[in-house]
Image (cartoon, rainbow, N blue to C red):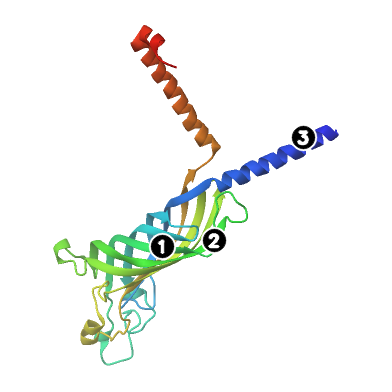
Amino acid sequence: MRTRLLLLFFSLIFTFTASAQYLQLMENRGEIGVFQGMASYRGDISPDYYKLNPSYGGFYKKLINDYIGIRLNYEKITLQGFDNLSPNLYVNPRNPPVTSHPTLSRNLSFERAGHDISFMLELYFLKFIDGNNHYRFSPYLSFGAGSFQTTSAKLNNATIKSQLLDSAITISYPMNLGFKYNVIGPFNIFGEATYRFTNSDRIDYFSDNEMKNSFQSSTSGKDQYFSFKMGLSYNLLKIYGPDKQLNEKKKKRFGAEKTDEKTTSKKGLLNLFKRK
């Protein structure tokens, strides 16, 4: 009985030591992931109601060290705004304002779909190691710059022709807050909230100045948009260790033996006269 217990004890120690060595010989080079969520915008149309639409995308991240990475992010986004969904009396025709100017009730709407591409610097708050129960979770913060490329648009339910698209490319400045949890092996689940500031006040095709001239005044400033998503990612690992070195030695040894056999077969009896 004692012998069995000792064998079990030493086998557990060996397993733990081997797994610890394995973790030390494993390097996380980067990460790829896919996600799906919801997106909306904040601007001049329907300023008090955020219309959420499905979004999806993916990313590639190159790790500089255990806490810093550079990320390339892509997201397919649709942005919409409808005055008739807003509780604001000045924009919703179903709730006309008590005024002698009924034209102030706007009933405007827009839709803009496109591709959001950005580069971000990502910072981890905690150390993250695959397969380690003590380092399998970390929140992170990302920020950078990108652009929103419009592919289709509508204004007041009328399709805008591609050659007439206004602000087809909008520069954005994303800020991203998220968390990552290692589920098993190199696979993780993550959640993110991304808020994007822009250099344009015409994502919804109306600026503050135009609103003052024709409709109820607006002071929203530059338009913004945001998204919330959940996803699955895969860590790109590189493993160093004795197994790899042994495999390389075997390849060299077997390759050398094959080379010697070929050389012997070619030279024949002349090998007998070689100096050893």
Q: Nearer the viewer, residue 231 or 214?
A: 231
| Residue 14 horizontal/vertical position (percent) | 68, 39
> Toward the viewer: 75 or 108?
75
N-terminal-most mark, 3 or 2: 3
| Residue drawn where x is 41% and y is 15% of the image | 275
- Give how far apart the Cα atoms at labels 3 and 2 are: 38 Å
Amino acid at circle 3: Leu
Question: Where in the figure is residue 21, as x and y percent of width and height?
Answer: 60, 44
Q: Residue at x 32, y 68 (%)?
A: 80
**Extreme-right residue of the structure:** 1
Upstream in sequence: badge 2 or badge 1: 1
Q: Which residue is mark 3?
A: 7
Residue pointed to by mark 2: 138
135 sits to left or right of 193: right
Helix, strand or loop under label 1: strand
N-term-proximal mark, 1 vs 3: 3
Q: Residues within 10 Å of mark 3 (few under 14, many from 20)?
A: few
Dot 2 falls on a residue whose secondary structure is strand
Identify residue for label 1: 38
> Do residues under tags 2 and 1 come within 8 Å of each other at their CB atoms?
no
Check the image and report above or below for 49 versus 28: below
